[in-house]
Amino acid sequence: MGIRYTQECLEAAEGRYPVGPDGKRPLSIRVQENWWLENVFGRAHPITPIFWFGPPAVYGMWVGSKAHGVPYALGYFLVGWLVWSLTEYLLHRYLFHFNPVNQKERLTAFLLHGYHHAFPNDRTRLVAPPWMSWPPGLAMFGMYTLLAPMPVAVNLFAGTAIGYVAYDWVHYYTHHFKPSNPLGKWLKQYHLQHHFAHEHSRFGVSSPLWDYVFDTYQPPVRASQKR
């Protein structure tokens, strides 16, 4: 099962996007020639993260509450969430938006995150499949076990896991829902500004916290300003 990218993927990585019969860019393109890599390993339903990370999160909160009480368990949970939110920001800013300098790097950048910016409404590629989300999750859990006793480590991981699920769901929500509540409208506007006006700022998806901390927040661009 070799890795062979489609011609339209290779061309899109170079900025040559396909155009449909209506003259518009399609909602998605095929990336892998191999059916299994394309459809099983390359795509994920947005509900799946809660199946992978929900049970460990519940277990972590239960262990933490039994070991040191609910207030401390909630505190460790919050710390774990903050760790995730900082990780989310740093990955988005420095890995997903690195500047490629050759063809190989342009393909890597496209596969990492460029595809999402080129085809932001592809519903099946917003959520990371297990082979992309499990290894970092295991690495973070391993880090916690090295830094803290096991009851604290699983409690911290609970916050990180739920932070990741929230990130995936907020991301999907901002692209594919039409929120009617003020918070939902604000989150959608915040993220879509990153796509269409401030690609090199507004890196927070689930929270704008670190954009303010690291001065990558930019005020929204109004439609009248784009002309």
Image: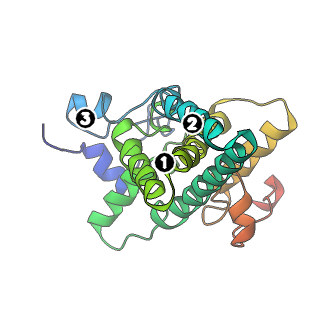
Distance of label 1 from label 2 (alpha carbons): 9 Å
Q: Position of residue 93 (x, y in %)?
A: 55, 64
Q: Are marks 2 and 3 in contact (CB under 8 Å)?
A: no
Which class describes the residues within 10 Å of circle 3: few (<14), some (14-19), or many (20+)? some
Tell me the kind of residue under disc 2.
Answer: Val
Q: Nearer the viewer, residue 29 or 100?
A: 100
Helix or strand or loop: what does disc 3 sit on?
helix
Q: First in sequence: mark 1 or mark 2?
A: 2
| Nearer-the-camera pick, 110 or 48 | 48
- Where, by quadrant of the figure, is residue 43 drawn? top left
Disc 3 versus disc 1: nearer the observer? 1
Label 2: few (<14), some (14–19) or many (≥20) C-alpha neighbours in 10 Å: some
Residue 66 in sight = yes
Distance from Cα at disc 3 to Cα at disc 1: 36 Å
Residue 173 place in picture, x, y as percent = 65, 34
Q: Mark 2 and mark 3: span between their CA atoms?
A: 37 Å
Assess whether mark 2 and mark 1 are in contact (beta carbons under 8 angstroms).
yes
- Residue type marked 3: Leu
Q: Which mark is residue 101?
A: none
Residue placed under numbered mark 2 in the picture: 63
Residue 195 location (% of width, % of height): 62, 53
Determine the image quadrant of residue 209.
bottom right
For this view, does 64 lie left or right of residue 211?
left
Whether residue 217 can be seen here = no
- Give the residue number, with chain letter if any, for mark 1: 150
Q: Secondary structure at mark 1?
A: helix
Seen from the viewer's position, the closer of residues 225 and 113 is: 113
**Residue under numbered circle 3:** 37
Query: What amino acid type is highlighted by mark number 1?
Result: Met
Q: Tag 2's secondary structure?
A: helix
Q: Residue furthest front?
A: 67
